Amino acid sequence: MPATVALAVARYRPEEEPAPTLQTYEVPFREDWVVLDALNYIKDRLDGSLSFRWSCRMGVCGSCGMKVNGTPVLTCAAFLSEHLPGPIRVEPLDYFPVVRDLVVDLSDFMRKLKKVKPWILREEEKPLAEGEYRQTPDQLDAYKQFSMCINCMLCYSACPIYGLEPSFIGPAAIALAQRYNMDSRDQGARERLEILSGYDGIWQCTFVGECTKVCPKNVDPAGAIQQYKLTSAVHWLKTLLPWGAR
Amino acid sequence: MSLGAHYTPYHPKWYRRRVSVWWWLQTWSYTRFVLRELTSVFVALFAVVLLWHIWALELGPEAYARLLVRLGTPLFVVLHGVAFVFVLFHSITWFNLAPKAMVVRLRGKRMPDWVVVGSNYAAWLVLSLAVAVILLRR
């Protein structure tokens, strides 16, 4: 095992340079270190000006998503030992505007997420006295996978469609919409249909499938989108029938 | 992407990377995706050849014989060979993706992916055998 490993880290200082550059740092190699540990070592010992986001260190918060050697990953789960020999290239997530160094702006996703109404919609709320909305384990199972999303944005960074068509709602937002559509307590599927089946919705997706591959939580956004395509197509066919509901 | 971003002393000056025209050569999975999309051209080509057959059949036995001769020329044989490889690639990649789009539930439990993929291949095999039997019966 090497004593040190080189990290080529993307730097972008908007007040100093017009475009990002790579800066190489030599950090100690430790078997139990992930890329995030190495970045924190750089920040603490070598260069305090390096900017990046992180919080939980354990794949829960979804803050530390970056590209490591070209692949979008959570840096808290990317071991240095898996990327030997160096230099290990660390870059900000693709397709989002870079604010500084490894920090990207996620407002675009936040706006889109709100559009798909990712919360339980009811036609009529039942009175509190009637108790909770009950659910069987099978009903929970129908959407649980999609509810594991931590909004880490790796799927957007892996999606060339999002890069080419920035107005595309994108994998995570659609998976989260589907999480509520599949929820037995929810009645908002019709409300979400317009945005999901609209121009910037599911039909932009050409099933590259990379979103599912990079997802650290096995949410399978590609699956969610394809399943919704089926739902949407069936709905459209029904509107063609004279007795079909519009 | 975020609209209305302007650089002011109080607002970040974002850097936006342009998507290269060669994005589909960046990784093998992107290239494979574009190849899979391109297979549609060859699927269409097969359909056109089929229509050509029907058209020649309608014109009469001489026209059909002329078509068969033309299809036997090296150009068409090579074209069919290439098209066959692409159509095979098309079928296999789509079968393998089927469980993503189709969630089959049996008594509330989701069927494992291999069942969905396997039944697709099984149907393919059965249909191919049926076609072979019909064609080779004489």
Image (cartoon, grey):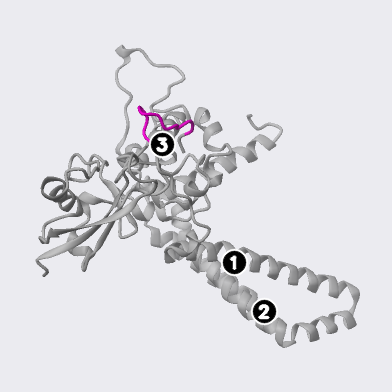
At 61% from the left and 78% from the top, the residue drawn is B82
> What kind of residue is marked 1?
Thr
Residue located at (35% from left, 48% from top): A93
Which quarter shows the N terminus of chain A?
Answer: bottom left
Residue A90, placed above or below residue A235: below
Write down the chain letter for disc 1.
B
Above or below, A11 against A190 in this view is below
In percent of width and height, residue A212 lies at: 38, 52
Which amino acid type is marked by label 2?
Leu
Q: Distance between the residues labelled 2 and 1?
A: 13 Å
Residue farthest along the front direction in this orientation: A16
Which amino acid type is shown beneath numbered disc 3?
Phe
Distance from Cα at disc 2 to Cα at disc 3 = 45 Å
Pinpoint residue A161: horizontal percent, then vertical percent.
50, 50
Residue B39 marker = 1
The label shown at residue A164 is none
- Foreground residue among B111 and A149: A149
Mark drawn on residue B79: 2
Mark 1 lies on a secondary structure that is helix
Q: Kindly report the distance in space between the C-alpha atoms of the residues bearing marks 1 and 3.
A: 33 Å
The residue that disc 3 covers is A109
User: Which quadrant holds residue B52?
Assistant: bottom right
Q: Position of residue A141 (x, y in %)?
A: 33, 41
Q: Give the range drawn in magenta.
A: B3-13
Chain letter, disc 2 residue: B
A44 left or right of A54 in image: left
